[in-house]
Every structure is written in C-alpha cells, then in structure tokens.
Image: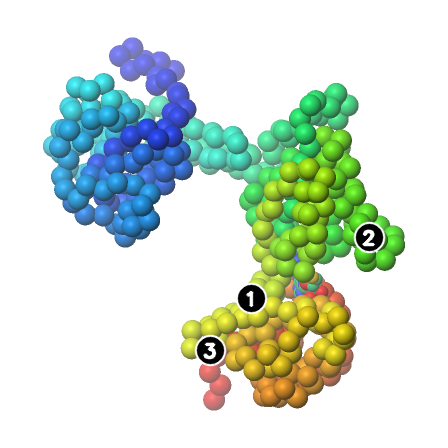
Amino acid sequence: MTAPGNPSPYPLGLRLAVRRVVVVGGGAVATRRVPALLDAGADVLLVAPELTPALRAHVDAGRLHWEPRRFVPADLDGAWLVQVAVDDRAAAAAVSAAATERRIFCVRADDRTAATAWTPAVTRHGPVTVAVLGGGDPHRAKATRDAIRTLLDARQGSPQPLSPPPGAPVDARPGRVALVGAGPGDPELITVKGWRLLTEADVVVADRLVPGLLLDELRSDVELVDASKIPYGPSRTQEEINRILVDRALAGAFVVRLKGGDPYVFGRGGEELLACAAAGVPVTVVPGVTSSIAAPAVAGVPVTHRGVAHEFTVVSGHLAPDHPDSLVSWPALAALRGTLVILMGLKNLSAITATLIAYGRDPATPAAVVQEGTTSGQRSLRSTLHAVAADVTAAGMRPPAIVVVGDAVTALDPPSG
Ligand code: SAH
C-alpha cells in the first residue's frame, strides 16, 4: 500500500564486494549488522571509540578497519553506504547530514523515519535470499520473515529443486554429488544444509544407518537407492555405490549420498569422493553430527570434561586387536588417560577390553555402551572396562552401538554418598 507522502521503498540487492561501507557505532546493533556486511564482501570501516568483544574479534582477525574515535564527515569519503548504529540522536543526525550531502544511502538504527534506506528482515536458503520490509514496522517484517522461513523449512514446502522436473529434457547442466552426513539417528539431527540438499536431490543413495524418517519425506519423484540392499560383499558393494554415484551424476542428476553420522568417520566417504573426482564429477561434502560424540552425549557422557578428560580418541573396533590388518595401536590407547570411543566394537569387545587391560589401562575404568543412540530404540548401560564385555552380552545389546571408556563416563553423575 502506498500512502501519499509515504511511498513504499524500492527493494534492491546491493552487491557490496570490496565496496566501502561505513558503520558508525561499536555496540550491540553494530555487532548484529557487521557479519552480514562482511558476508557480502564489503570493505567495512567501523568508526567507534569502543567495541564489543565480538567486533574486536573481527578487527583482530583483520576482517575490517577500525577507527577508534568519534565519527567525522570525511569518514564517508569513498563510501557507498553507511549504517548508523549509535543511540545518540545528535551524533546520528550528523552522520545522516554528511551522508545526504554526499548522496550516500544511510541506514539508521535509532530513527527509521530519518533513514534513507531500511534493512529488511532476512532469511537465507542456499542461493535464495528472502528480504522482508514491514512497511515501517520491523516487528511485522520479522513475523512475516519467520512465516516464510517456516514455509521454506517445511518438508513439503522446500524450495523447488534446482534440477529439471521429471520428464523435462535434461539440460547441459552437469550433474553433481553431495556427500551428506545424516546425523546419528534422530531425523532432527541432520544439518540445515544437509536437509536443504536432500530436498533438492534427484537421486538419494542412502545407508542402512540413515534415519528412515528422513527418507519418508522425500518427494515422490526422487529415485531412492538403498545401498544396504546392494548385493555382493563389502568391497564390490562399495564399487557398485561409486558407480551409481558417478553414472547418475554424469547423466545430469543431482545425487545426494546420505550417510549415517558424519561422512568421513568410518563412512567410506573419502573413497566416494575419490571415485567422483576421478570421473570429473564435482562433489560437495556436508559434515554431519557423528555418533561418536552424539551417542555418548545422549547417554549422559561428555567426551571431554574439565579436569577429567582433555582428549578423546575415536577408534574402530571392527578388527580384533591382534588382526594383521589392524591399524590401531592398542598399547598407545591403553596408555592414554582420556576418553576412548570405540565404534563397531561389540563383536570384538572382550578381546579389546582384555588388550587394553593387558597394556595397563585400569580395569576399574568406567565404561558405557550406547545402542541406537538418539533414536527411539536407544539403550545404554554403565559398567567398567573389566566387566563391560560380559555385561553387554548379558543385556543382549546389538549393533549399532558405541563403547565409551574413561573417567568422563561418570563425570556428570551426581556425587554419591
Ligand atoms: N559415520 C558414522 C559411523 C559409521 S560406522 C558416524 O559418524 O556416526 C558405524 C558404527 O557407528 C556403528 O557400528 C556404531 O558403532 C556407530 N553408530 C552409528 N550410529 C549409532 C547410534 N545411533 N548409536 C550408537 N552407535 C552408532
């Protein structure tokens, strides 16, 4: 709506890369505004006698220039835009006057009616930026922005895929692969970026450990390849997965390779990256929340704790300690004082714990086992290094499970006595 004398603003996307933007003020408002300016590549000059610690960190990292004093009109020389982030009306008005004289747009945190430009409420979704102006009411702008963000986040309302709809002629756009960590099991523990790419995929190649609920919500036209159903042994299966990723991408599809936890923690993500690279297929890696940290956490075990554990080590227990192919130095692990997180270790657990004890780790060291952490099937038990293998058998625990050894296991327990 346009009222006479109060025309609606004209929206623009400013391309600020290497353009001078002056921010006047070093408090909370400037702290909130500066990151987006830096993100846009602006050459930021900050003028303020004092800075918040967050702004100081930008200065120390060399991301912007700081003039530690009050504003003078010459600060605007060469600037394209100025943001006034001071409470002092008179000081703000002086910046406005200097900006108007130089025909530089001026955003004012203290007085929107005196401003010549308004900052919208923003939400970003990959390449898409949504900016909302509330007709002079910042609360309305934020509420509208939040509603749009919810819509874009909503599984049904995800942005249109960047790829052609089914049946459309495949354009010259080359395909690509994203190696996406799906998180440890709870479907809400995928990252925002991972979820967005999943909603954009033409083909999804999923692991056994990937939360089923994530797959339930894929668009019906997405081709879903269940990697756990590919026959052959472990190495042939991996070759087959690599071939599927490369073939689909070379045919122009956007392929999401969805892997439990983090793609590079015992996930063979590196092999898939190399296979794609060898075929000239571009790959993006989206890290995930790894079960090696998340499963202990949800069972009450912090992998580090001040004064208790200053290190944590994640190892695979899929090979017995005396296996000729084992790359793990069990004597070195037994000598550590910190937290030991063992993945894929149930089958060899008695050999592993006996080896750690034989090389000197205290048999009374607390241990915990977490099965299907972060899922509705989560189970866990507490024990000691000495007893844990027998306790796991007695409790009938099965993979996927994680074993944690170290004093961190009991660090959060209430003091006994
Ligand atoms: N890339 C994965 C790990 C793959 S190896 C990650 O970063 O989490 C598979 C092993 O991970 C399983 O044998 C088990 O030891 C562990 N694991 C995966 N998900 C788990 C979960 N939700 N709870 C407990 N252990 C889990």
Q: If you read the primary sequence from the N terminus, does the residue marked by circle 1 or circle 3 appear first?
A: 1
Identify the coloring.
rainbow
Horizontal side, residue 402 vs residue 41: left or right: right
Select label 1 or label 3 by which is in front: 3
- Across and down, in percent, residue 395 comes to 74, 78
Q: Amino acid at mark 2?
A: Thr
Q: If you read the primary sequence from the N terminus, does the residue marked by circle 1 or circle 2 appear first?
A: 2
User: Is ligand 1 within 8 Å of the beta carbon of the residue shown at mark 1?
Assistant: no
- Kindly identify which residue carries mark 3: 308
- Across and down, in percent, residue 25 comes to 21, 40
Q: Nearer the viewer, residue 207 or 359?
A: 359
Within-10-Å neighbours for mark 3: few <14, some 14–19, many 20+: some
Q: Amino acid at mark 1?
A: Ala
- Kindly identify which residue carries mark 1: 297
* Residue at x 20%, y 28% (from the top left corner): 76
Q: If you read the primary sequence from the N terminus, does the residue marked by circle 2 or circle 3 appear first?
A: 2
